[in-house]
Image: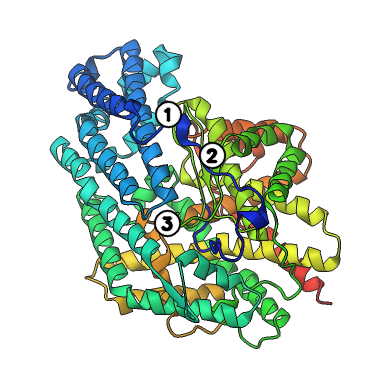
Amino acid sequence: MRPFDTPLPRDTAEAGSGALGELPVWDLTDLYAAPDAPEIAADLDRVEAAARDFAGRYQDRLAELDAAGWLTCIQAYEDIDRVAGRLISYAGLRYHQDTSDPERGKLLGDLQDRITAATTPLVFFSLEVNRVSDTALEAHFAADPALARYRRVFERMRAMKPHQLSDELERFLHDQSVVGAAAWNRLFDETMAGLSFDVDGEPMGLEATLNLLTDHDRARREAGARALATTLGANIRLFARITNTLAKEKAIEDRWRKLPSPQASRHLANDVEPEVVQALRDAVVAAYPRLSHRYYALKARWLGLDKLEVWDRNAPLPQEDQRLIGWDAARETVLSAYAGFSPKMAELAQPFFDKGWIDAPVTPGKSPGAFAHPTVADAHPYVLLNYLGKPRDVMTLAHELGHGVHQRLAAGQGELLSRTPLTLAETASVFGEMLTFRKLLDAAASPAEKKTLLAGKVEDMINTVVRQIAFYDFECKLHAARAEGELTPDRINDIWMSVQGESLGPAFTFMEGYETFWAYIPHFIHSPFYVYAYAFGDGLVNALYAVYQAGDPGFQDAYFEMLAAGGSKHHKDLLAPFGLNAADPAFWDKGLAMIAGMIDELEAMEG
């Protein structure tokens, strides 16, 4: 998934599929033939029956199992998860194609309800696993290598042992989830999809309006920013209500689970130590002056401005080529960059183009942004884009295909072990971007083209590292303030502005209305504290790319082995073959130094 803060255009009036070539759409028949396919009903029945059978066979009996019994048990659990995942993946992907279609929303809601109810009997499993002694589990792992392969699954379950509730309360939270956070998430999505932004008398959707912030015409950029401020401001009470409710719900559950901080559940889910995240955050914040502050001062000079306004942050450089990049050219650019690293990488990416695994056109009601969804281990990933032919769209294609390659390789681990923690889930995507960027930079025909490419990459890295850590600080401050009482929209706005000035620096002035721009960032709603994963991934890739550039002949094999491991290993074990350790505070400085070095290059071009 791309950082949502990076505008991804959806203005069909400016560039349709005719100008860009034939844009691919999803073929979801590899999951189910149609929304009324009999296989959907059959799989729902299968999940319900399998969950009942699982509970009947194993509840209150896990401690009695031998190693072979444990293996049969975990494989049965994995199979239920796989079938349920296929159902939700299909309904979810159809919904993202058109969130305004009530039928698609109903199918997703109905399946979520049925599957939540069907899997309630499984709640006992992780709770009872955590009552089995370490000694007993280790003995079973030693007795059966096939069971030992699932060690990380058990370790992740047992990480929650100090925070689990009674069996009855865990079942209640499971059942209640569909009318809790999931319902508020859907309200946010449908509200945001239905908003209209008035740009000089022309109504636009969110993505088309965000796209104006990258327009060459400064007046159009300003018009887009002011339209965002007007519409977000008019709806800010609703977004504040959603945010307050979700933050309070999270605080209640965290208190019951005795979690030490609002961020703790995300760190546990990501399989990363809090001190590693803190080291990342501190390194990035300390680097603000030599990264974002310095770059934006440079950009102000390029644009001939004393101060940048918020609508200048993602402005193109005056010399930037305005030509659209057709779909065929985008595909060739990314695949050739991948092949330059390894033919295997291009081969893994090719089916996305050939088999309906990408949905690229801009269509009414389509979800904003871009993502790669892994679906289930016995199917394949799907990539969603909103492609309009800008250079950043090509980089987004490279990013999401990196996810897709990673997900295809990790699928060999099976349903429970293929899921990569968020801290490593951005590795292949950012690496794919870096490969594509380096190919374009090497092919630059002029110093002006090189400068444009280099500046674009620096901006993307600032959006991925500086911007996302500022988002993380915003969330930390917001949840801390919510613990003291309900937050008014003005209070949330103030928290937002406190991190914006610090991260963007003195080159900016902030228009009235910018204080509401927190409201359109979906990560704050869907995945609290997700955002640091982007900075983690970027810093990790910068360090990895330095190892690659050093010419290690075994790098490609080690890289593919790391991706194929999925969630079966801890980040320390995955990075060890490259001589890297994310727990070392100096690790993050190395990655940040790469960004600073690019800014050095840009400053040298001024002389």
Quadrant placement of the C terminus? bottom right
Q: Which-is-in-front pick, marks 1 and 3?
A: 3
Q: Residue at x 46, y 32 (%)?
A: 29
Give the label on residue 415, or none: 1
Is residue 565 visible to us here? no
Q: Which-is-in-front pick, marks 1 and 2?
A: 1
Q: Secondary structure at mark 2?
A: helix
Instruction: Work out which residue is located at the far left of the displayed protein and give it.
Output: 168
Q: Position of residue 246 (x, y in %)?
A: 27, 59
Asked if 119 appears above or below 524 in the picture, the reply is: above
- Residue wearing tag 2: 572
Q: Amino acid at mark 1?
A: Glu
Q: Which-is-in-front pick, marks 3 and 2?
A: 3
The first of marks 3 and 2 along the sequence is 3
Q: Secondary structure at mark 3?
A: loop
Q: Secondary structure at mark 1?
A: loop
Q: In the displayed structure, does residue 158 sit left or right of residue 574?
A: left
How many discs mark residues in the rendered view?
3
